[in-house]
Image (cartoon, rainbow, N blue to C red):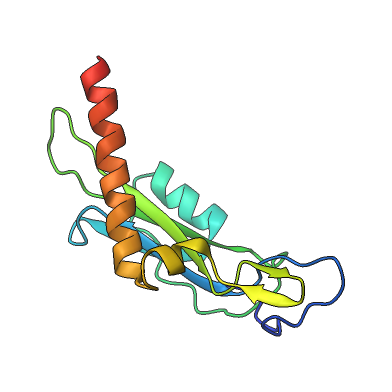
């Protein structure tokens, strides 16, 4: 997840921030969650008009002011009287910051033995714990 022509970690001076990593999107059930990428206005209109989502956008890379690409995710809950689902967006930056000229890895890498699956599992457990708290308080 970066600018298409960006040099990883090719930054200078005080304007240091994470600039290279991987995006993960985790759904509750991969058979009921479908993702699409395309021009945001087209995706939005298809959703509002209950149309089939446009096929994936193949015009990559391109400038953000040229029909900027967006992502949409549809969760099919089927016929339900009450139901819930979730999408978890996880951005895995390879290095979080430059500290005294030494690149620092994100804290989770040290705490979870550099295992992104453990991080995803922790996020899902956190979601379920929060939902249980909300449900119990009603």
Of 124 and 80, nearer the camera is 124
Q: Pick out the residue farthest to the top.
A: 138
Please state which of residues 80 and 117 is positioned toward the viewer in this rendering: 117
Q: Position of residue 11 (x, y in %)?
A: 79, 77
Question: x, y percentage for residue 110?
Answer: 45, 68
Count of picture labels: 0
Quadrant position of residue 127: top left
Q: Residue at x 35, y 61 (%)?
A: 119
Q: Residue furthest right?
A: 13
User: Residue 27: where, in percent of width, then height?
Assistant: 28, 55
Quarter of the figure with the N terminus: bottom right
Residue found at x 71% / y 85%:
7
Does residue 24 appear to the left or right of 86 in the view shown?
right
Residue at 55 percent of width and 74 percent of height:
94
What x and y, as percent, mark residue 133? 27, 27
> Quarter of the image holding residue 97?
bottom right
Residue at figure coordinates x 48%, y 49% from the top left? 44
Q: Splitting the image into 4 quarters, where does residue 77 fall?
A: top left
Q: Quadrant of the C terminus?
A: top left
Identify whether 44 is placed above or below 113. Answer: above
Q: Is residue 81 left or right of residue 18?
A: left
Please give left or right for residue 43 compared with residue 123 in the image.
right
């Amino acid at each position: 997840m970066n600018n298409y022509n960006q040099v990883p970690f090719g930054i200078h001076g005080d304007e240091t921030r994470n600039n290279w990593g991987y995006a993960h999107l985790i759904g509750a059930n991969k058979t009921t969650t479908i993702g699409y990428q395309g021009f945001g206005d087209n995706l939005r209109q298809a959703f509002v008009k209950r149309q089939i989502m446009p096929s994936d956008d193949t015009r990559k890379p391109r400038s953000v002011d040229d029909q900027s690409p967006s992502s949409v995710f549809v969760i099919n809950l089927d016929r339900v009287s009450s139901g819930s689902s979730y999408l978890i967006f996880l951005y895995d930056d390879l290095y979080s910051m430059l500290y005294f000229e030494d690149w620092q890895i994100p804290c989770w890498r040290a705490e979870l033995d550099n295992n992104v699956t453990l991080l995803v599992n922790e996020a899902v457990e956190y979601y379920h714990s929060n939902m249980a708290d909300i449900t119990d308080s009603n």
